[in-house]
Structure formats: structure tokens, C-alpha cells
Image (cartoon, coloured by chain):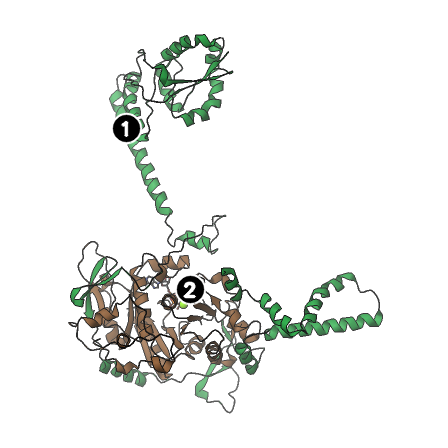
Amino acid sequence: MASIDSLQLHSLCNLQSPVGRSKLQIPSSLVLFRRRHKNLNWVQVQTNQRFVCKSIVDDESSTPDEETQNTQNDDDNEKEDDVATTQNSNNTPSDSNTSISRFQSMITTITIHSENSISRLRSMITTLPPVTFLMKKSSGNSVWIGISIVATVLLASIRAYAIRKSRDNRPAGSVSDLVRRGQLRSGDRRGISKGMNYEDPFNNPFVKLGKGSSTVEMCGKVYKLAPVTLTEKEQSVHQKRRSRAYQWKRPTVFLKEGDSVPPDVDPDTVRWIPANHPFATTVSDIDQDLAQNNVYQKQGVPFRIRAEHEAMQKKLEALQNEEKLNNLGIDSQNARDFQRPYKFSSKLEEDENVQKSSQENHNDNSSSEETHKS
Amino acid sequence: MASPRVFTTHHRPPLLPSSLSSTPLTSLPRFVKSPNKRTPIQSVLQFNRKPQLAGETPRIVVITSGKGGVGKTTTTANVGLSLARYGFSVVAIDADLGLRNLDLLLGLENRVNYTVVEVLNGDCRLDQALVRDKRWSNFELLCISKPRSKLPMGFGGKALEWLVDALKTRPEGSPDFIIIDCPAGIDAGFITAITPANEAVLVTTPDITALRDADRVTGLLECDGIRDIKMIVNRVRTDMIRGEDMMSVLDVQEMLGLSLLGAIPEDSEVIRSTNRGFPLVLNKPPTLAGLAFEQAAWRLVEQDSMKAVMVEEEPKKRGFFSFFGG
Ligand SMILES: Nc1ncnc2c1ncn2[C@@H]1O[C@H](COP(=O)(O)OP(=O)(O)OP(=O)(O)O)[C@@H](O)[C@H]1O
Ligand SMILES: [Mg+2]
């Protein structure tokens, strides 16, 4: 015993008057039956449409729509269509023809299903006026006007929203780029921007020199060129004016405010740095020669790191001596603390390993980038 | 402007010894008025060949302005990356002590682990503090200090001179350009930043306060022996110039008496590119401001200057103009 599970219309049915219960000639080829051992399921889509129809004809009516929507709504409709299903539960397969005719009479409004939504919309609009006209016989015209106005406003706002949406997707440096760079927080929205570089700076089609070289075309616009009129003589006049106006010696010695000027220093070349200067200070925990050596160092362990290792090693040796002396079990926490530095500093004695390990330690800035790239 | 261009007569690779490739400024008759001749302006707008490196390498250029917020950092990022795109190796030094933001403009902020302060202290080596740009591997960034650390001024500007020396003698070869982004003002930071430089790019906007500062800074630079000073006029708005609400580029030049390296139009793309961490000159399609920066970089390489300024013409489609050029 198979019952009709769903009814789906796939092509156009020419319906002129959805209101009047005219006999609809629906070719059986247009009606799809899904035979299952289940109750008949009446397919209903778009509840508002159904509502409109219901108010006119006292029947269960439906507007079959796209197949996808149907299948989505199948489950929902199962409950609603209890009546229909109980009525048809006894139908045998041979009865299906009669049940079709019964359904045909029940179908009052079928929206035209078409591929593009515009024509669907149009068909909806053409089916609506008679419905409302019947509903409110006297004031049908003004209601129709109102509905069309609402529809227009709705369409316009949807369009505006779509346009704004598409503009938001623009990849150029908007706030979303700040989000991408981690400067702004915005949930876990993290897009990767595409590279926008143009590779060949020597072949730029955006710059064209016009004929006669008095115009230039850039980015599609034509500009006139006006010659620069400054002469070398004028330039030197300005230089002389400035050399009279500004007399200055670049300070080469920086002293803290309140310090006394060392005897061998020209007071004109002293720059006084206030103690609370936000970005500069005269105090340094390192002397000039050492700093210079640090800048010039091309390879090997940086000075400070090496010094720290040595200090650590000394500390460790002292600890070991102490351990030998009292030969008691040092508490295990302490021992673990020094295990790793000990291994590292023992390597320090072999010269080659030192460089390697330090490079691994400090490859953050430049060297790692190259390895990442490859 | 009517100069028989040195590079057209004999092409040399840009990395030859400086004595060979140096082009004395005086050899170029630079400000001759002859707009009718065709060749000069053409030479200015060439994009179809690599510019010829003039002067001694490394060229140590300080980008300064006096007044704050006129576009020094923007200029450093864009000119620096343009130079890298032209094939030169570039080290950009952010010498803005407390308010560094060159790393942000370049989109390298997450990769700055060490700065010059750490190098001086021996926490890392110089090569570890250099941040290599992934887009153009011949561009490297070096920051002077972290936002919350102070530069020990005991050594004055000497530290920067050591840096330049160390870069000159590094194993992979000396960079062609060392560009220093100078902090605003004429404070200790400025003094430090200009110490190693032997040429300067003065960034200014066409307003009277920026111009007064620019004139002062130019005077100080000249007192310090930096003779090669060229200016970039930034944020130029032709619409305001037409209404006589803003000085024109030529007005600015008349007041300062400096040769023009570039004129950059006001462009909202500048802010957007800052947000992206992607300098304007890399924009595709290129923007007017990006092209202007690119041409400024071109002239910087060849120690050239603008011979003609782009002015508005043919209001074809929109009433929106900018200018720069020859
Ligand atoms: N041509 C331009 N068009 C539009 N905006 C610009 C232009 N040039 C610079 N700006 C904007 O001006 C602001 C300041 O630029 P920038 O940081 O480069 O100046 P600065 O001189 O380095 O400032 P500071 O003195 O603080 O270091 C930025 O927000 C930048 O986006
Ligand atoms: Mg800056």
C-alpha cells in the first residue's frame, strides 16, 4: 500500500483565476508522486501565501514551490496535514487516480514556478490583486496601492543592503585590515589579504607622456606640465639667507641637566638632556667602547648573552662545590632548575656549538625569515 | 632640464664603485627653462628602465621636516620600498625614538624583536635586529628603540655612525641606500638622526607653519654640512590651489629655494595603505600619490630633481586633480 508522499509541480501551470474554483487541468506528467509506505504528505511552502488563500477558500491549499523548499518543509507539514493523511490512508495504489482528481479540486492556487525569481515575483503580483479584491470588495484599489508601495520599499531596501554589503567586501585598507594585523580585536575574523603589488615597476602603463611633452597622462587623466622656474642663483641666495639666519653647531656631547661640562668639551656642542626625557637618557649601563664593539660584532654570541652564560656557569660551579662540601641531597627542585643551564654552559666550551645555539636562539628577526621563506 | 642625461650616454650597473658612478650635481644644468624641448620632460617620466644610481654608496639619506605629521614616515616607507623595487638594497632606520611607526606603515610591526638599543647593550647582534621585508628581500628595517625603552644618548649620534660603518662592512655587502626616518622637532632625536646623513629629503606641506619649520630645519642641516637637500611637497590639493586657498608647489619652492624631489597629492589611499600595512607604491592599480612617491624615489636614485610640475588640465571626467611630474 503506497500512499502519495509529496506532490511536486515542476513546470508552469497556466492558472488565470486562482480564486474561482475552476477545474484545473493539470497534466499528470506534471505531478510527481513519491510512493512511500507513509502517509500522504501535502506540500506547503511559504506560509504567508497559504494564509492569503486560506482566507478566501476554506480549503487547504498550497503553493508548491521549488523542490528544495519542499523537502525542507516536508517534516513540518507532516503534522499539519493530519486530516489529509487520514482521509487518504486507505487508498490503494489503484485509487491513486481518484485521489489525484480530489487533489486537483483541492488545489486552488498554484504559484507559477519558474527558474528566475523575477518572473516568480511577477506572477505573485499578478495573482495577488484578485485575491485582495475579493477579500475587500470595496477598498481593493487602495489596498493594492499600499501593497505595491510596501513591496517597492522592501525591494529598494534589499537592494541598498546588497550594495552596502558588496562595498563592505572591498579588500582595500579598511578597518578589517587592522583586524587582520592584530591591531584591532574583532572576534576570530582573520582574513588574509591578497598581495596587491604590481611586479614590474619599469613597465607602467599608467603613465604616458603626451605629444610635445607639455602634458602627461596619469591614471587616465591628462595633466599639463608647468616648468620649474627655480634657478641655481636663487637657490644660493636662499642658502645665504639661511646661513645668516641660523647659526648652529650640531651637539655631539649629551649631558644630563645639572652635570658639569668636562674640561675638553666645547660648551657649544653640548646637548642637555633632562633626566625625565621620555625617549632619551644619558645613563647607560655599558661603556662606549663596549657598545661600539657590540654594534660591530658580526657573528658569535652577543656580549650580554655570553656574560649571562658565564655568570650562570660560575653560579653553577659554586653550587657544585657546595654540593661536594656538604654532600647532602640538595632538594630536587633546585637541582632541576640548574640542569638545563648546566648542559648549555658546558657546550659553551666548544666554540662552534656556541655560535650555532645562539643563532638558533636569536633567529627571530632576520635569519629565521629566510628559512621560513624557503 | 635640458641635461644630456648621463645615464643615456653610458649605462652602468648601479653597484659599481662609487667613484665611477658618482654624478656630480654641478654637471647637470638643472634649472634651465626650456619647456619646448621634448627630451627633458620625457627623461623625467621614464618608467621603462632601471634608474642609474648616482653618488657614493651607501647613500645615507635622512627624511626630515621639523613639523610633525607632515608625512616623513609615509615618505620613508614609500620611497624606501620603491628603491627596493628598483632593485637597490635598502636599509630603513626608524630613528623616531619614542613614537616609532615606520614598522606599522610597512606592516612589519610583529617582527621587530630587537632594536638598536639591544644591539648597543649586547643583547643581540646588528644582523639580528634588521627585519627583512618578505615582499622585497632587499629591503630591511631597523628600529632605534622600543616604545618603552630610552636610547642611551651618552654616545650621541655616534651610535648611528657605528651602525652605518657596520652596515658598510657587513658580509653580504653594503646597502645602496640607508634611509633614516627622522623624528619631528629639532630635539635630541633629530640631532641623532641627522648625524650619519650626507643628504636630506625635506618633507613639507604647503602651509605656512610647516614651511617655517622646514626653513629652520634646512638651515640647521646646512650648518651641519649637509648640502644636498631636496624637498618633497606633500598633501598637495590642486582644487585649493586653484581657489587660491593653498600655496602651489612653485610657491613653496619660491619660499624655500630648494630643488624639488617630488610633489605628492593629497590622497585618501595613503590612510588606507597605512591601515593595511602595505605601502602605497605597492598598490595595484597604482594611485596618483603612489606614482608620485615612485617618481620621487626615481629622482633620488639619479640625484635628479623635478623640472616640471604637473598642473591640472582637461577637466574631462571629474573635477578632481592632483599634480606632480617632471
Ligand atoms: N599625501 C597624503 N594624503 C593624505 N594623507 C596623508 C598624506 N601623507 C600623509 N598623510 C597622513 O598624515 C598622517 C601623518 O603622516 P606621517 O606619520 O607619515 O607623518 P610624520 O611626519 O612621520 O609624523 P611624525 O612627525 O609624527 O613622525 C598620516 O595619518 C598619513 O596617513
Ligand atoms: Mg613619523
**Residue bearing mark 2:** B136
Residue A97's mark?
Answer: none
- Element type at mark 2: loop
For image coordinates 84% across by 69% down, the residue present is A327
The image quarter in which residue B30 lies: bottom left
| Chain identifier, brown in the render | B
Counting from the top left corner in percent of width and height, residue B255 is at 25, 75
The crowd level at tag 2 (other Cα within 10 Å; few <14, some 14-19, many 20+) is some
Per the rendering, the colour in which chain A appears is green
The chain under label 2 reads B
Counting from the top left corner in percent of width and height, residue B199 is at 36, 78
Q: Amino acid at mark 1?
A: Ser
**Residue bearing mark 1:** A148
The crowd level at tag 1 (other Cα within 10 Å; few <14, some 14-19, many 20+) is few
Counting from the top left corner in percent of width and height, residue B316 is at 18, 55
The chain under label 1 reads A
Query: Ligand 1 is found in which quarter of the picture?
Result: bottom left
Q: Is mark 1 within 8 Å of ligand 1?
A: no
Q: Where is A72 relative to B35, above or below?
A: above
Residues B48 and B193: in front is: B48
